[in-house]
Image (spheres, helix red, strand yellow):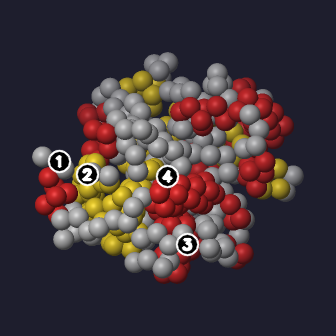
Amino acid sequence: MQPMTDVAIVGAGAAGLATAFCLRQAGISVRLLEKSHEIAGPWRKRHPQLRLNTHRDLSQLPGLKMPKDAGTFPSRDTLIRYLEDYARNLDLPVEFGVEVTALERAGEGWRLETGSGPVAAKHVVIATGREATPFIPDWPGRGDYEGRLIHAADFGDADQYAGKNVLVVGAGNSGSDILNHLSRVDTQSVLISIRKGSVVFPAFMFGVPMQRLAPLLELLPLRAIDWMLRDTERMAFGNLRQYGFPVHPDGGATRMATDGVSPAIDNGFVAAVKAGRMRIVPEVGRFRERMVVLADGTRIAPDVVIAATGYRTGLEPLLGHLDVLNSRGVPRIDGAQTLPHAPGLWCIGMRPTMSGYFRAASRNGRAIASTISADLARRPAHKPVAAAAVAGAHA
C-alpha cells in the first residue's frame, strides 16, 4: 500500500522551506523533496562576493529572523548558514537526493515519479525557483567562438578579472551585480553590451537603503511605481542617456510584471561608467572565431565575455504537458493561484517582486498553506491507495 501525503513540495530552497513551515504549522502532512544533497545548493555555486539585493529585514522566512550581524544586505555565506539553520529547525526532514522526473494527475491527487520511487500526494507545490537554469542566447557564430564565454552564474572571484578586457552582456539584475564588483577591480577595460536597457535603482540614497522602501512601493499601481523608479533614477544619477544607457519603452515595474526583468541595482558601476572606466556599447550581433561583432559592426576581442542574460525555470520536462507554463517556460500561476484543469498544483518563487524573493516566499507560502488547509478540511478522510491503483489512473 502506498500512503498519500497531503502535500509534496518539489524543491527545498527558500520558497520550499517557507511553504513547508507554514503547512506544518497548519498540521498538514508534507514531504519535502530536494534533488541536491544539501541545503542551498544553488547559492553555494554563486560567486563569493555576492550579497543579496534585499534588505536583511526583507530576507527572512516565517519563524526565523535573519540575524542582525548579517548586515544591511546579507552575504551569500550568511544566507547559506541561515537556510541551514532554518532546515534544521523545521519539523520535517528534507529528503535529499530525490529528483522528481514526472508529474501526473492520479484520481483526486497527483503522482510524482522520482528516482526513489513514486510519491502520491493530494497537492503538489513546485518550488524549484525561476533561476534554475542559466540561459545564454544562441547568438550567430557562438558555436565557433574560440574565446572565453561564461554565464554570470560562473562569475567566480572578482579578482581573477584584474588586468583583463571584459565584455559584460546585459545590465539587468545579475549584470549590475557583476558590474558593481568589477567596478572595484583594476581591470584593463569593461564594456557593457545592452540590448533593451533597464531602469537603474540605487542601493543607497542619502545613506538610506532604498530597497527597504519596496513594500510601500508595492502598494501602488504599476504606472505609479514606473514613474517613481524613473524619477529616482534621474535624481540619483542624472541623465544616464548621455552615457549610452538605452531607454526601454516600458517602466521598471511594468517590465518586472510582464517580462520578469528586475531593475538594475547600482552599488558603484554607474560611477565607473561616468568616470570612463566602463563603457556602454551596442548589443551583440554575432560571434566570430576570435572576436565579437556588435550590432553597429564594431569588432572587439575581449579576454572574457560574461553573459548576464538571465535564467530559465527548466520546468518544461516536468510541467510542459500540463498546460501550465507560458511561452518562456514560467508557470502561469504563483502563490495561492491555481488552474481549473490542474487542481491541487501550486507554484511558488516564480515571479520577481519589488520587495524581493524571500518576502514573496513568506507571503505566498502562508497563502498556499491557508488555501490547502481549507481544501483538505472539505475532503473526506483519505484511505491509503494501493500503488497499483494509482498507476492504473494513467492506463
Quadrant the N terminus occupies? bottom left
Q: Are marks 2 and 3 in contact (CB under 8 Å)?
A: no
Residue type marked 4: Ile
Determine which residue is flagged by label 1: 394
Give the spatial CA distance, label 2 vs label 1: 7 Å
The x and y percentages for residue 37 are 33, 72
Of the two numbered discs 4 and 1 in the rendering, the one whose residue sits closer to the viewer? 1
The answer to whether mark 2 and mark 1 are in CB contact below 8 A is yes
Q: Seen in the image, is 395 located left or right of residue 199?
A: left
- Which label sits on residue 359? none
State the SS at label 4.
Answer: loop
**Residue 348: image tag:** 4
Residue annotated with mark 2: 106
| Residue 189 visible to an observer of this rendering | no
- Marks 2/3: CA–CA distance: 27 Å
Q: Residue at x 46, y 25 (%)?
A: 294
Q: Earlier in the sequence, mark 3 or mark 4?
A: 3
- Which amino acid type corresponds to the residue marked 2 in the rendered image? Ala
Which of the two residues, 267 or 319, is positioned nearer the viewer here? 319
Foreground: disc 2 or disc 3: 2
Q: Which sits earlier in the primary sequence, circle 4 or circle 2? A: 2
Residue drawn at (30%, 28%) of the image: 141
Amino acid at circle 3:
Gln
Q: Quadrant of residue 139?
A: top left
**Element type at mark 3:** helix
Which label sits in the foreground, 4 or 2?
2
| Mark positioned earlier in the residue sequence (4 or 1) | 4
Q: Earlier in the sequence, mark 2 or mark 1?
A: 2
Residue that badge 3 annotates: 25
